[in-house]
Image: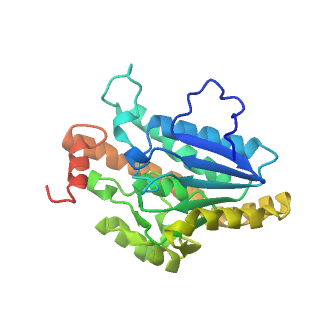
């Protein structure tokens, strides 16, 4: 496959994401392995541009999201969310705005792309890593995949897209959040969070074969089938719950800022990195 020029973003310096199209499949590859595919502002903006290109391209019927390297994604890269010209410290209102646009809105809009999408996940998928694979319709996991959301150590109730309860069921969602422990690919499959688990070397071929199989179906019927399932979840309250809990998440940020003196909670970040031992 050859990299494809993305319409409308020719001026963008696309450095952390590769977007390719072949045989009706749009393949988005997060390519920042030297940083465990942590999500900087640039990563997020490039991912969104790639998702939009795949959504707009009439030749693309199915989207595959994967990442290069050992780990799928280590979460948000908090050190590079601001432009260099901006003050280092966040105000609570601008932080709310930043997370609304770059975290919540992106994840929700990727879920709504009217084409089937498949995430291929290997290695660690930590915190905001979940916000890359959960919006996808199907998830294929390598047998070394581990999923976790340890952000309770930062004083918040989980990542910005609070889909945990929907993805895992209430008890396992609580255990994941309360302990910060990871669940394995096999456990995630048992919980219905991933569709199938395969050996690492078969991860991308499996995701691509699944995408090619789905791409043989009628595009509009696929769109309606996706809409039917998503709409069912929305009638059950999915999007309303996500939106409401986002504000709860920001109450956590605000309270942590009062306690530790900054947004995001740097003390909490340190504690998270040390496994809660400090
Ligand atoms: Zn947040």
Residue 159, image x and y in percent? 42, 54
Residue for point 33% across, 55% down = 151
Q: Is residue 181 in view?
A: yes
Q: Please name whichever residue, 29 or 154, is drawn nearer the observer in this view of the structure.
A: 29
Residue 67, image x and y in percent? 52, 52
Q: Is residue 159 in view?
A: no
Judged left or right of residue 89, residue 62 is right
The way the protein has been coloured in the rendering is: rainbow
Residue for point 42% across, 57% down = 70
Q: Residue 51's quadrant in the figure?
A: top right
Q: Is residue 165 above or below residue 133?
A: below
Judged left or right of residue 99, residue 26 is right
Residue 55, image x and y in percent? 72, 46
Q: Residue 140's quadrant in the figure?
A: bottom right
Residue for point 21% across, 37% down = 261
Taking the view exactly as shown, the residue that stands out farthest to the left is 278
Q: Please name whichever residue, 270 or 61, is drawn nearer the observer in this view of the structure.
A: 61
Q: Residue 139's quadrant in the figure?
A: bottom right
Q: Is residue 94 above or below residue 166?
A: above
Residue 89, image x and y in percent? 30, 29
Judged left or right of residue 230, residue 170 is left
Q: Is residue 104 above or below residue 202?
A: above
Judged left or right of residue 209, residue 58 is right
Residue for point 33% across, 53% down = 156
């Amino acid at each position: 496959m050859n990299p494809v020029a993305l319409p409308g973003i020719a001026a963008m310096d696309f450095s952390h994401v590769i977007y390719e199209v072949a045989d009706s499949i749009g393949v988005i590859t997060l390519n920042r392995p030297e940083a465990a595919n942590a999500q900087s502002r640039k990563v997020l903006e490039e991912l969104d541009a790639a998702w939009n290109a795949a959504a707009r391209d009439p030749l693309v019927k199915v989207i595959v999201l994967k990442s290069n390297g050992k780990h799928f994604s280590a979460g948000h890269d908090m050190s590079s969310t601001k432009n260099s010209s901006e003050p280092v410290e966040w105000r609570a209102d601008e932080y709310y705005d930043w997370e609304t646009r770059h975290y919540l809105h992106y994840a929700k809009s990727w879920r709504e792309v009217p084409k089937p999408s498949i995430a291929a996940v290997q290695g660690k998928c930590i915190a905001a890593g979940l916000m890359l694979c959960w919006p996808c319709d199907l998830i294929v996991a390598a047998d070394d995949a581990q999923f976790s959301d340890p952000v309770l150590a930062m004083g918040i109730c989980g990542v910005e897209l609070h889909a945990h309860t929907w993805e895992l069921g209430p008890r396992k969602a609580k255990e994941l959040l309360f302990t910060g422990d990871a669940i394995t690919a096999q456990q995630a499959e048992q919980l219905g969070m991933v569709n199938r688990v395969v050996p690492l070397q078969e991860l991308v071929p499996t995701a691509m074969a699944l995408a090619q199989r789905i791409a043989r179906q009628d595009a509009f019927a696929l769109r309606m089938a996706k809409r039917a399932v998503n709409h069912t979840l929305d009638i059950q309250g999915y999007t309303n719950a996500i939106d409401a809990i986002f504000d709860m998440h920001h109450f956590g940020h605000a309270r942590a800022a009062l306690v530790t003196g900054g947004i995001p909670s740097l003390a909490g970040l340190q504690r998270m990195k040390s496994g809660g031992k400090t």
